[in-house]
Amino acid sequence: MFLESMDFSNTYCREPFSSFLEMLNSDTCLNHIFLLSLDFLLLSILLVVLVCNISLRNLLSYGIPKLSISSTIFNGCLSLGYIAFGVWKLKEQHQEYEFVVLLVHGITWLFVSLFISLCKQQTLLIVKIYSIIAFLLAMFLCITSMWKFNYDTTKVILNALSFLGTILLLCIGFIKESEYDETFYKPLQEFENGIITPFANAGFLGKLSFWWLNPLMKKGKNKTLEDEDVPHLRSADGAGTCFDLFNEKVQMLKRKDPLGKPSILMAILLCHKKSILISGVFALIKILTLTTGPLFLHTFIEVAQGRESFKYEGYALTAGFFLAKCLESLAERQWHFRTRLIGLQVRSSLTAAIFHKQLHVLNAAKKTHSPGQIMNYVTVDAHKIGEFPFWFHQIWTTILQLVLVLCVMYYSIGVAASAALVIVILTVLANSPLSKLQLKYQTNLMIAQDKRLKAITEALAHMKVLKLYSWEKHFMDAINKLRSEETKWLSSVQTQKGYYLLLFWSSPILVSSATFVACYLFGVPLHVSNVFTFLASINLVQQPIRNLPDVVGAFIEAKVSLSRIVKFLEEPDMHTRDMKNQRQDDVNICINCTDVSWEMNSLKPTLKDINLNIKHGEKVAVCGEVGSGKSTLLSLILGEVPYINGTVDVYGKIAYVSQTVWIQTGTIQENILFGSNMEPQRYRQAIERSSLVKDLEMLPFGDLTEIGERGNNLSGGQKQRVQLARALYQDADIYLLDDPFSAVDAHTSTSLFNDYVLGALSGKTVLLVTHQVEFLPAFDSILLTSSGKIMESGTFDGLLTKSEEFQDLVNAQKTTSDPKCQEAYATKRPKEAEIEFDNNVSSEERDDVVSLKGDQLIKAEEREVGDAGLKPYIQYLKHNKGFLYFSLAVIVHSMFVVGQYIQSYKLAIGLQDSSVSRLKLIRVYTVTGFSLILFLILRSILAVKLGLGASKSVYSTLSGSLFSAPMSFFDSTPFGRMLSRVSSDLSIVDIELPFLLNYTVGSIIILYSTYVILCFFAPEVLLVIVLMIYVTILVQRYYNASAKELMRLNGTTKSLVANHLAESIFGIMTIRAFAQEGRFFLKNLEFIDKNARPIFHTFSATEWLILRLEIICTLSCPHGCLA
């Protein structure tokens, strides 16, 4: 099928490999007959199918995807290449039989590519099998020809192109249906969310070149990007779609194994298996094209020494090298982009799953999963798992790349390559025990982070109390102790990373030194072509070895994070409350329980022997000592208490007012409506009956005034009355009021009782927990609780007569209550409030109020605009001798790079000088290499010192600023925004930033030093390099204008997710009581997508930039090659 003349005459490629490869040589007569038979058989079948079953109209009725067009053009040109190659062989070498084989194969290749590319129906099984066989044969012949890289360069190029052609055919043959489905199935959701990202409708070439991103990049150049400028995601990438797919896979695994727990990892893999496969194909193309670099270098050296195969081989090699580099860049960019997209989808689905779980999880689970830990699951753990798909393929591509590079080494230096193999194996073995230590360090670091974040969460949530009692320093010292424990494990993790940095940067030096020593021992001759082919291969070994610690680290971090999230997701859910709409015997609440407990198998139940029937319209008061079970009784009715022995039946809709006030960030109106539609009459009545009219008149924007998180800018009484208005507006059948008057003064509580309980709730079933005995005579029934039991029940007069405990309770309360208020409860139907709330404001007035929201208490999160320059990096380096460590690291790395160039230069000069002893040359090279390792050790130490010092200083400054901030800061700053700073943002500073900074500076030093070397040895490329640098700077500036704003938007929008999660955790009982889980979950999906939009376009813009920079650099390759 692919025809070669395999030459196994190389001195270092003999037994046992040569006999095996000769047996598989495609140039034998038997193989020619077999390939011709296969081609003729397939041609006959395809012609029959095309003529009998498929018309041209059917082929084109649904349009042709751009991938199919590209495949047809590519493979058609390839078939012409085979035919042209056969004609050349017939003319120049008179090999007639090979011309026939090439001609038949070229025609067959053309027909197969047309059929698979254009057929809209399910591809025939025989064609799929043919594509698989072609792929395997092409891969085998491509690898073997690259192994040998014989002097017929045309054959090598055709083999490589044939392999790429089979990959295109495989993609079309197996993923074609989904491609058509995506073309014609457009969910309406995509058109309801505003501007959809052009990626949704981009063609194959547009996606390949990231051309679809140009409109956003242009807009970012012309203006500062705002949130509304960033397009919405495709529906397939939305959090809702990702969560539904994830949940569907989890449920499928549950059905397969009802007794076991579904594997969350398996569910994730099932959700993204197709995307993982496609990105894997791009990864494979990248690795194969990357490996051709040393082979091209070898051939260039041979041509430069006058050993060319044909007249214009140098030009052909230059064109082939240029195309290989372009293909490598395109494949790598698609690989990284698609894995980043998978990571974003995984992150969105896990974040949504965590939020969904916390809406339904048992309250008992909150003991093992604190609010701070749940926040960590979303802000840190989900992020780390989302980063892992980027590294996933590098697990196997690293191995493949090492194998291919070792093959190239074996080709260039023969059996001496075994030394390189030994060093690589030793490096991996040295890493194995360290991986276990890293797992231990990472696990303990996450535990320490959870403890610190839990303490910070509690402190920030009660900052007003801390400031009132001047406890800030005491709590900050306690949190700093937890931070010290965290820093201990952080130091271990950073030291481990530093060791990896040393081990894997020094590995190429060890490999080259050991291999040259082996060359001397085995008597392998060293000359320019094989030595520099080997050194080029060393550079390819260096990349996967450098990436290996990152891959291992990402794997361990993802494993630890996934185990933590899985533990939370596997917690039992609450039982769905059985809400019956039909009342039985006019009863709203019926409870028959022998014991009730918050924990499983508790020896001391919270409630015991509860038998209660409350009729429709009945007013019931619950009173008793503190801790007697009053609030637990209400929780039992709400379905919050998980473990009960008996039955609880509730008939009707419930409204709930909690003892601990819970108010959302937003306007007063939004808090009262709580997701319901506005009905002016009902809304006005809710405000009047809750005694909020005068309060709203005093606020600057009335009911449109934004209130801080948990109502921080309202008094305790105002917050409680907003809760009462929220419950009243829901127009429920049953009202559960947990001590609602405790935060208001006596006169206001009397007014509320008359207007609200006795007035607005007349005809409603009311269960009110109270300590105010002056209201008890107005109730139909009173429940007296003690030690988790209902000790007595009856009317006020009846209990006063027969219960001594009730008498003691009433007498104790009377001594502390206002006697003037005890007479005010008698009026059952109070008069309407004299002050009328006017809700019928004009739309113009309402717009004026909305336009003034810039003066509201809650401020939008600020972000820098424009180019911040080096300011953030300078601020980072100012912490704890950062400039000193950084400057030393730059100097040391520069000396390392200079040492590497001197080492290579001395080697090149020595190889060309026959008078220089090879042993002496190898000795100098090895000693120089080991000296360079000392620079690597010092650089690793400086990187760890820089990271740890900056982390301690940044945290100290951050915590000091938080605890010393005025109370107005906490009133105007959402809780989630503060938690985001001390969790995910601090984690980036702790772990990622120091090594990314060192890697970036190191890469810049290597890049510009390479330019200097090129200009020194080849001055004619100076103009090209200067022009290339100028164009590169222009492209980078064009990119920076949009990318920086996208990154800043990411920073501001991620706090929305954290803030909404924190609010929901604190108000979970209220949310569940009003059955608002669905609305809050949809709001969470909205915030996740709002944060995902800048993330998606940020990494897309990164790939956009890298692709263009690589193409610009590749354009300079032909000039360098021909120079």
Image (cartoon, grey):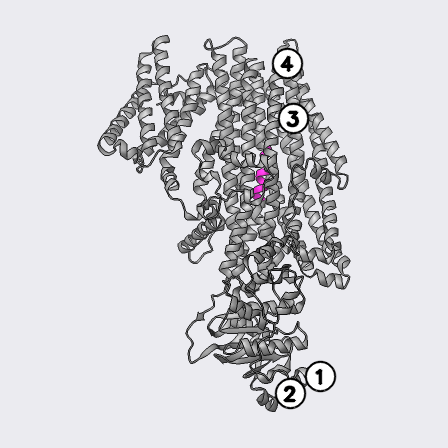
The outermost residue toward the bottom is: 801
Q: Is residue 429 visible?
A: no
The outermost residue toward the left is: 52
Residue designated by label 4: 1019
Residue 602: quadrant of the picture? bottom right
Q: CA distance from mark 2 to mark 4?
A: 104 Å
Residue drawn at x 63%, y 25% as measured from the top left: 1007
SS assignment at label 2: helix
Q: Is residue 2 left or right of residue 829?
A: left
Q: CA distance from mark 3 to mark 1?
A: 83 Å
SS assignment at label 3: helix
Mark toward the viewer: 3 or 2: 2
Residue designated by label 1: 815
Residue designated by label 2: 807
Q: Is residue 632 left or right of residue 586?
A: right
Q: CA distance from mark 3 to mark 4?
A: 19 Å
Question: How many numbered markers are drawn?
Answer: 4
Q: CA distance from mark 4 to mark 1?
A: 100 Å
N-term-proximal mark, 2 vs 4: 2
Amino acid type at mark 4: Pro
SS assignment at label 1: loop
Q: Contact, CB < 8 Å: mark 3 with mark 4? A: no
- Across and down, in percent, residue 841 comes to 56, 62
N-term-proximal mark, 1 vs 2: 2
**Principal SS element in the magenta part?**
helix
- Across and down, in percent, residue 895 comes to 71, 25
Amino acid type at mark 3: Ile
